[in-house]
Image (spheres, grey):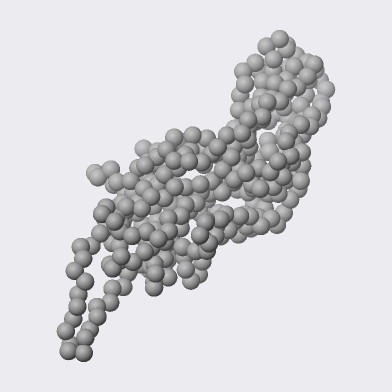
Amino acid sequence: MKSIHLFLLAGAAVMLAAVSCAKTETIQDETPVEMSFKAMTNLPTKADPELAGASLGTDNDYVIYAAASADGSPKYFDPAATSYGGQLFAYFTDGAKWFPASGSPYAKQHIYWPFGGVKVDFLAYALTPDAKTALSPTFHSETHAREFTVADWDTFSNQYDVMYAVANGCVAGTDGNVSLAFNHAQALIAFTAKKSATTTVDLTINKITVKDLEYVGTLTVDNYRANLKAGWTISAHGDKDLSAAEGISDFPYTLNSTATQITTNLLIPEQSAKQIVINYSMGGKTFDYELNIPRTPWEMGKKYTFNLEFSAAEITLTPTVDDWTGVVDNEQIG
């Protein structure tokens, strides 16, 4: 079982005691409440290969970063608080939970809610360690829970599944727990292919091209407003061979009578669905086949599967669209 590291951008909360003119002190008599987290997501259709597994749990190896802002303290969690830019949370098998940690080997530490019922906003993203290094997301410089950005991301060359979550106006409560429900920042497109049972001629798919694909952009997850908003600013587009990207099957791919998922690709959402051309060979000749697909925009958090069946006489296409978000996992962090 792999371990998860949860990094929280963290700093110390400041509590002020009121001092009267008579030099007497009024001290808030509160019991410290330890801060804890639950990470939740629906990932039955996780992007291959970054997050293989059934849940956002200990079967995966990735990190989660979170930034928090509190009323009167815009950097309640401060990335400058430690040399590595945050508070390390590590999974300890003895308690089967995630705890604040430091050092190597890890030693357990603790983080507590601010006193006085101060509300705290949380903004988080989840991604693999490789993705964190490659993409270098940044939080808002003054109020970290208000925004994070992944700039100039080549999503075709860097097939990383970035997820984001928000929990605003949180107070300690009785158990100190915060639930973070993660959503995907992209759409997922997949292809399955087979040849009909009566087709004996050899059939191979050589490549799958998307025409004028928008593939480089800046992702901004904006928590300024009442409703969290994630959006993209596009900086590059062009024809892209999906079979050349990081996928499932080697190409050219030889078809058989069993429907097999041959590729998956993460795509920038909210762009109009593009022309898709399948280049294939049959009987020693090569052909291009343009898929007749709906021109509606690809949506964030949706998986689009194009099921292809080839015969000597025709090609049939059955498209499906599935939700790629929700909640299935409630493993506690903290």
Q: Position of residue 235 (x, y in %)?
A: 70, 57
Q: Looking at the image, can residue 105 be seen?
A: no
| Extreme residue in the top direction | 198
Q: Position of residue 17 (x, y in %)?
A: 24, 78
Q: Relative to residue 239, is residue 41 drawn left or right?
A: left
- Identify which residue is drawn at 37% across, 42% down: 330
Q: Relative to residue 108, is residue 132 drawn left or right?
A: right
Q: Quadrant of the N terminus?
A: top left
Task: Please say if 320 is above or below 145.
Answer: above
Q: Position of residue 141 (x, y in %)?
A: 50, 70
Task: Please say if 162 is above or below 34.
Answer: above
Q: Looking at the image, can residue 285 be seen?
A: yes
Q: Relative to residue 234, is residue 227 drawn left or right?
A: left
- Which quadrant holds residue 113? bottom left
Tag count in the figure? 0
- Which quadrant holds residue 328? top left
Relative depth, front residue between 68 and 235: 68
| Extreme residue in the bottom direction | 21
- Identify which residue is drawn at 61% across, 24% down: 260
Relative depth, front residue between 144 and 154: 144
- Identify which residue is drawn at 47% across, 68% down: 143
- Identify which residue is drawn at 30% across, 59% down: 172
Q: Position of residue 230 (x, y in %)?
A: 57, 54
Task: Please say if 222 is above or below 16.
Answer: above
